[in-house]
Image (spheres, rainbow, N blue to C red):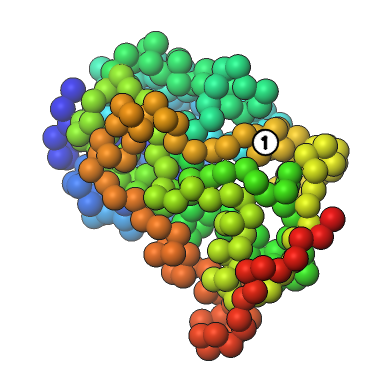
């Protein structure tokens, strides 16, 4: 199904981190956008991404099927961005990322709309991680229901509102050390949120083949420790590292999962034991950014645009005033 401009696109989870960039990318292409979320009163800021009346938040909850069906009425394309990193109450991996994904796919099929679903690298029904298993079941549900659906699997996503670099940079303001789970050797392929959003928009415009799973990684493969060192260099702070063996981290996570915001959960510890990079098969089959013709941006090009606030004197910090020693010691 080819999507023309001025098509109606419904985005589930459009009020989140990635969602605001997807809304902006689609608005620039002239689409009418319906942002389906649990709290539309908290998503009205998205209306400034487009012209008057172009972006409209509406109420929908994946656990209430009638609201999902109502949200997609008259839609040409449906985008599912819903995902959580930690379970909370009724917001479980199964309810949102598996059953919820099937509900969205069935609703899209009922109005003959095409479908794009954002999953994650590492999605695997055989994974020891509940998060990864639910993501894989969601992918299967989408493709079983809408065979020409487009599935996107990004690696760790970074950008001005991310919960990775911002969180550790904030921690570095007060803590003399930063934690390295498992020694910080797990590899990632960080990808800029704006590049992922453009890939979603290309899926909406049917610029890539349907019925396929695309893996999206940035131009650099870095270990967890290397990402921390890059962040520290950017904010010009010298910090040491403390290694947390995965076993100890899992025990700590059993307690921390009950804290506000769940800074670390047992399932996240499981996820961190596996590399999060684009697979060799995706590269060989060109199921990467290459299929979209997108040149992904580097961390060096983006991190300075939003981590400057964590420097000792913020944007007024003189270059080189606080030299970063990238060889700061690791402590046990």
**Which residue is at the front of the view, 166 or 227?**
227
Image quarter of residue 274: top right
Q: Quadrant of the C terminus?
A: bottom right
Q: What residue is drawn where x is 52% and y is 74%? A: 308
Q: Residue furthest top?
A: 144
Rendering coords of residue 187 (x, y %): 57, 44
In the displayed structure, would residue 226 be above or below residue 94?
A: below
- The relative height of residue 49 versus residue 259 in the rendered view (above or below) is below
- Residue 217 is situated, as x and y percent measured from the top left of the image, at 42, 43
Q: Which residue is mark 1?
A: 273
Element under label 1?
A: loop
Which residue is depicted at the point 68% across and 74% down? Answer: 238
Q: Is residue 81 visible?
A: no
| Residue at figure coordinates x 70%, y 64% from the top left | 171
Tell me the quarter of the picture where residue 141 sits: top left
Question: Total of numbered circles in the picture?
Answer: 1
The quadrant in which the N terminus is found is top left
Question: Is residue 234 in view from this perspective?
Answer: yes
Please indicate whether residue 297 sits to the left or right of residue 127 in the image. left
> Residue 59 at x, y = what percent?
46, 36
Spot occupied by residue 8 in the image (x, y as percentages of width and height): 24, 35
Which residue lies at the image location 70% right of the left edge and 33% below the top edge?
A: 270
Disc 1 crowd rating (10 Å Cα; few below 14, some 14-19, many 20+) is: some
């Amino acid at each position: 199904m080819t999507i023309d401009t001025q098509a109606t696109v419904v985005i589930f989870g459009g009020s989140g981190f990635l969602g605001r960039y997807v809304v902006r990318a689609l608005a620039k292409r002239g689409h009418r956008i319906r942002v389906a979320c649990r709290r539309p009163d908290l998503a009205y800021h998205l209306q400034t991404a487009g012209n008057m009346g172009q972006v409209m938040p509406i109420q929908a909850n994946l656990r209430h099927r009638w609201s999902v069906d109502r949200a997609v009425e008259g839609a040409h394309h449906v985008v599912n961005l819903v995902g959580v990193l930690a379970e909370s109450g009724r917001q479980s991996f199964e309810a949102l990322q598996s059953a919820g994904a099937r509900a969205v796919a069935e609703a899209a099929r009922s109005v003959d709309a095409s479908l794009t679903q954002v999953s994650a690298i590492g999605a695997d029904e055989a994974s020891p991680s509940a998060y990864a298993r639910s993501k894989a079941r969601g992918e299967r549900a989408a493709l079983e229901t809408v065979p020409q659906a487009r599935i996107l699997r990004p690696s760790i996503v970074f950008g001005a509102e991310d919960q990775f670099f911002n969180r550790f940079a904030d921690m570095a303001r007060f803590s003399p050390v930063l934690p390295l789970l498992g020694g910080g050797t797990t590899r990632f392929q960080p990808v800029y949120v704006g590049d992922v959003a453009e890939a979603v928009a290309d899926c909406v415009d049917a610029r890539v083949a349907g019925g396929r799973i695309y893996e999206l990684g940035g131009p650099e493969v870095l270990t967890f420790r290397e990402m921390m060192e890059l962040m520290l260099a950017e904010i010009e702070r010298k910090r040491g590292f403390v290694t947390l063996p995965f076993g100890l981290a899992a025990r700590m996570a059993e307690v921390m999962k009950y804290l506000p915001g769940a800074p670390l959960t047992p399932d996240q510890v499981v996820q961190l034991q596996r590399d999060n990079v684009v697979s060799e098969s995706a590269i060989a089959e060109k199921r990467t950014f290459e299929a979209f013709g997108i040149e992904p941006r580097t961390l060096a090009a983006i991190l300075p645009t939003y981590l400057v606030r964590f420097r000792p004197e913020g944007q007024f910090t003189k270059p080189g005033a606080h030299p970063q020693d990238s060889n700061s010691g690791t402590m046990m």
